[in-house]
Image (cartoon, grey):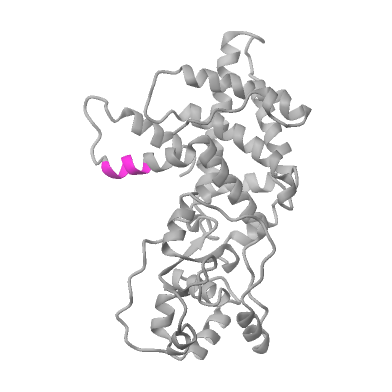
C-alpha cells in the first residue's frame, strides 16, 4: 500500500503550466511522508490522489472525448493552493497552510468524485421462490413501456438493463441465471451457453441519483463534473436512468466496484434484438452508458490504485465494520479521524 510515489519533475511530461504546480505537490508529499507513522496516512493519500489525477488527465487526453478540460480545471485548483490569505509570503506558516490545502483538495476528490463512482448496490441476489413463469414477450413489452420513464425500483432498473444487454453479462456474454430460470424461451435460447448470476452495476452511485433528494456528497461530485465541461451529464444521471447501468456477472461487478478493473471509452452498440424489438413496438432504442462517464470512472480507478486510495478506502471500510465500540484508550482515534475526513461535507 502507498508504494507508488509521485514521479519527480524530470520524469513527467506535463505542459509548462502543469510543471509549474508539480513542485508544490512534491513538497506536500514530502511533508506527508515525514508525519508520524499512522495506519491510514490520509494526507499522503490526498496529495497522491491529486498528483495522479493531474497526470492521468494529461496522459489520457487523446483516449476520451472531453480533451484537456479536466486537466486544466484541476491544474487551476492546485494553483489556487499557493494563495494563503493573511500569511507572510515564504514563511513556514504559509508553506504548512499550502500543503494542508493540497492534501485536503486531494481528499475532496477521493471523498466526492471517487465515492460517487462506487455503485453501492445490494449484495448478491438470491434466487426467487416464485414458481410462476410469465410470458417472455409480455415481460419485454412491460419493460420497454417502463423504460419511457426513469425506473421506479431497483428491479425496474435491472430489468431495463438486462433487456438492453440481451439478458447477458456485458463483459463475458454469459446469460443471466435468474432470467433463464424465469423465461423458458430464454433458457432455450441459452442452450449450450454459459450462465451466471448477474448484478446491475451502477456506474454512478445509486444514492447520488435520487432526483428528489440526492445524497449531499453528490452535489460536490456534480459540481466537479460541471467544471470538467460535462454539465449535460448531470441531469441524465439523476433518477436512476438505464444509461448509467451495466449488467455484469456478480464476481466482475464486485471487482469493478472496488476499482480492481475498469472500462475504457469506446464506441459500442446495444444488443440488436433489443433495438429491433423497440423499433417494432414504436419505442426509441435503449441507450448505453455515456462514454464520457465511463472515461471519468476509468480515471478514478487508475488513480485509486496508483495513489493507494483503493486499498485505503477498503481498509477503512473493513475496520469500520469490525470496530463496534471505540477503544477507551484512544486506540480507535485514527479510524475515527479517517472516517470523519472521509465523510466531511458528504452528509
In front of the other: 13 or 144: 13
Magenta segment, principal secondary structure? helix
- Residue at (32, 86) in percent of width and height: 131
Q: Give the residue displayed 24% in from the left and 41% down from the top.
A: 324
Name the residue furthest left: 328
Left or right: where 88 falls relative to 262: right
Residue 64 is a magenta residue: no
Find the magenta span and give its range: 317-322
Is the N terminus in the top left, top right, bottom left or bottom right quadrant? top left
Depth order, front residue of 231/261: 261
Name the spot of residue 214 as percent of width and height, x first. Answer: 52, 55
Relative to 145, residue 64 above or below: above
Q: Residue at x 36, y 64 (%)?
A: 124
Marker count (numbered): 0
Quadrant for residue 336, please give it: top left
Q: Quadrant of residue 250?
A: bottom left
Residue 91 visible? The answer is yes
Q: Is residue 152 visible?
A: no
- Residue 321 is one of the magenta-drawn residues: yes
150 above or below 293?
A: below
Residue found farthest to the front: 192
Q: Position of residue 46 (x, y in %)?
A: 52, 31
Q: Which residue is drawn at the image coordinates 27% and 27% (left, top)? A: 331
Amino acid at each position: 500500500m502507498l508504494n507508488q510515489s509521485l514521479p519527480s519533475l524530470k520524469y513527467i511530461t506535463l505542459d509548462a503550466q502543469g510543471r509549474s504546480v508539480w513542485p508544490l505537490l512534491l513538497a506536500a508529499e514530502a511533508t506527508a511522508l515525514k508525519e508520524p507513522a499512522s495506519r491510514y496516512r490520509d494526507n499522503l493519500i490526498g496529495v497522491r490522489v491529486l498528483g495522479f489525477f493531474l497526470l492521468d488527465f494529461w496522459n489520457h487526453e487523446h483516449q476520451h472525448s472531453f480533451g484537456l478540460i479536466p486537466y486544466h480545471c484541476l491544474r487551476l485548483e492546485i494553483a489556487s493552493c499557493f494563495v494563503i490569505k493573511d500569511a507572510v509570503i515564504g514563511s513556514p506558516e504559509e508553506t504548512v497552510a499550502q500543503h494542508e490545502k493540497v492534501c485536503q483538495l486531494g481528499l475532496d476528490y477521493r471523498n466526492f468524485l471517487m465515492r460517487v463512482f462506487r455503485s453501492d448496490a445490494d449484495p448478491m441476489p438470491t434466487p426467487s421462490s416464485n414458481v410462476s413463469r410469465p410470458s417472455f414477450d409480455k415481460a419485454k413489452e412491460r419493460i420497454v413501456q417502463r423504460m419511457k420513464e426513469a425506473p421506479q425500483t431497483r428491479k425496474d432498473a435491472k430489468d431495463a438493463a438486462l433487456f438492453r444487454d440481451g439478458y447477458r453479462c456485458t463483459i463475458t456474454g454469459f446469460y443471466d441465471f435468474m432470467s433463464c430460470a424465469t423465461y423458458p424461451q430464454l433458457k432455450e435460447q441459452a442452450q449450450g451457453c454459459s450462465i451466471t448470476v448477474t448484478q446491475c452495476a451502477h456506474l454512478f452511485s445509486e444514492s447520488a441519483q435520487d432526483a428528489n433528494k440526492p445524497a449531499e456528497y453528490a452535489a460536490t461530485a456534480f459540481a466537479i463534473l460541471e467544471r470538467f465541461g460535462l454539465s449535460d451529464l448531470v441531469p441524465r444521471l439523476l433518477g436512476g436512468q438505464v444509461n448509467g447501468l451495466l449488467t455484469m456477472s456478480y464476481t466482475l461487478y464486485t471487482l469493478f466496484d472496488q476499482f480492481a478493473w475498469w472500462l475504457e471509452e469506446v464506441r459500442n452498440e446495444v444488443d440488436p434484438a433489443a433495438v429491433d424489438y423497440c423499433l417494432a413496438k414504436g419505442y426509441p432504442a435503449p441507450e448505453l452508458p455515456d462514454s464520457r462517464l465511463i472515461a471519468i470512472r476509468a480515471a478514478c480507478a487508475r488513480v485509486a490504485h496508483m495513489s493507494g486510495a483503493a486499498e485505503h478506502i477498503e481498509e477503512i471500510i473493513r475496520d469500520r465494520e469490525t470496530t463496534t465500540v471505540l477503544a477507551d484508550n484512544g486506540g480507535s482515534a485514527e479510524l475515527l479521524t479517517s472516517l470523519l475526513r472521509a465523510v466531511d461535507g458528504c452528509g
